[in-house]
Image (cartoon, helix red, strand yellow):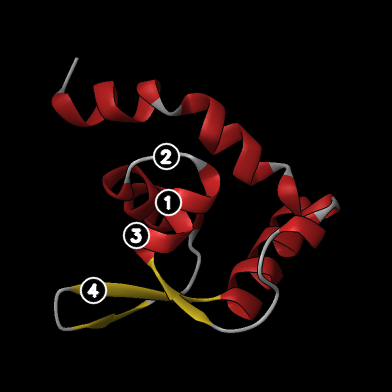
């Protein structure tokens, strides 16, 4: 098992939570741009694993220096598209 897989498995519940949020996103920000650190805290996962989630799920993001920024609108649109 690689180190990356170990981190992903430790947050599997959080990954599943994020995958099922598009149905009821009311408790999370719907607009605005937030760093991966903020998103990770919202979902109760590590920042490293949130970045891995971005890559796995194809959620659009952009880098600003060493920060990864995700637009809330883009995040929810991506989640809804995955449901279809």
In the image, what residue occupies the spot 64% across and 37% down?
17
Crowd tier of the residue under label 2, counting other residues whose Cα lies within 10 Å: few below 14, some 14–19, many 20 or above = many
Q: What residue is pinned by disc 4? A: 67
- Mark 4: secondary structure: strand
Provide residue 31's location: percent of width, then percent of height. Answer: 66, 82
Q: Earlier in the sequence, mark 2 or mark 3?
A: 3
Mark 3–mark 1 Cα distance, whole angstroms, equals: 5 Å
Quick one: SS at disc 3?
Answer: helix
Tell me where residue 32 sits by quadrant: bottom right
Q: Tell me whether circle 3 and circle 1 mark residues in contact (CB < 8 Å).
A: yes
Q: Position of residue 52 (x, y in %)?
A: 34, 48
Q: Residues within 10 Å of mark 1 (few under 14, many from 20)?
A: some
Q: Are marks 2 and 1 in contact (CB under 8 Å)?
A: yes
In which quadrant of the rendered image does the N terminus lie?
top left
In the shown orientation, is residue 57 left or right of residue 25?
left
Left or right: residue 69 versus residue 74 is left
**Residue beneath disc 1:** 40
Q: Is disc 4 in contact with disc 3, using a CB cutoff of under 8 Å? A: yes
Q: Is residue 8 above or below residue 33?
A: above
Query: Relative to residue 71, is residue 73 drawn left or right?
Result: right
Most distant residue in the top direction: 1
**Residue that badge 3 annotates:** 37
According to the picture, the residue beneath numbered tag 2 turns out to be 45
Q: What is the CA distance from the residue labelled 2 to the residue labelled 3?
A: 9 Å
Image-quadrant location for residue 8: top left
Left or right: where does residue 34 sit relative to residue 1?
right
Local secondary structure at mark 2: loop
Total numbered circles: 4
40 and 55: which one is in front?
40
């Amino acid at each position: 098992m690689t180190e990356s897989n170990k981190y992903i498995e430790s947050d599997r519940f959080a990954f599943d939570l994020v995958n099922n949020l598009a149905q009821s996103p009311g408790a999370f920000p719907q607009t605005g741009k937030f760093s991966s650190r903020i998103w990770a805290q919202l979902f109760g996962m590590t920042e490293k694993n949130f970045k891995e989630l971005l890559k796995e799920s194809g959620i659009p993001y952009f880098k600003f220096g060493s920060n990864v920024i995700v637009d809330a609108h883009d995040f929810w649109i991506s989640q809804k598209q995955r449901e279809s």
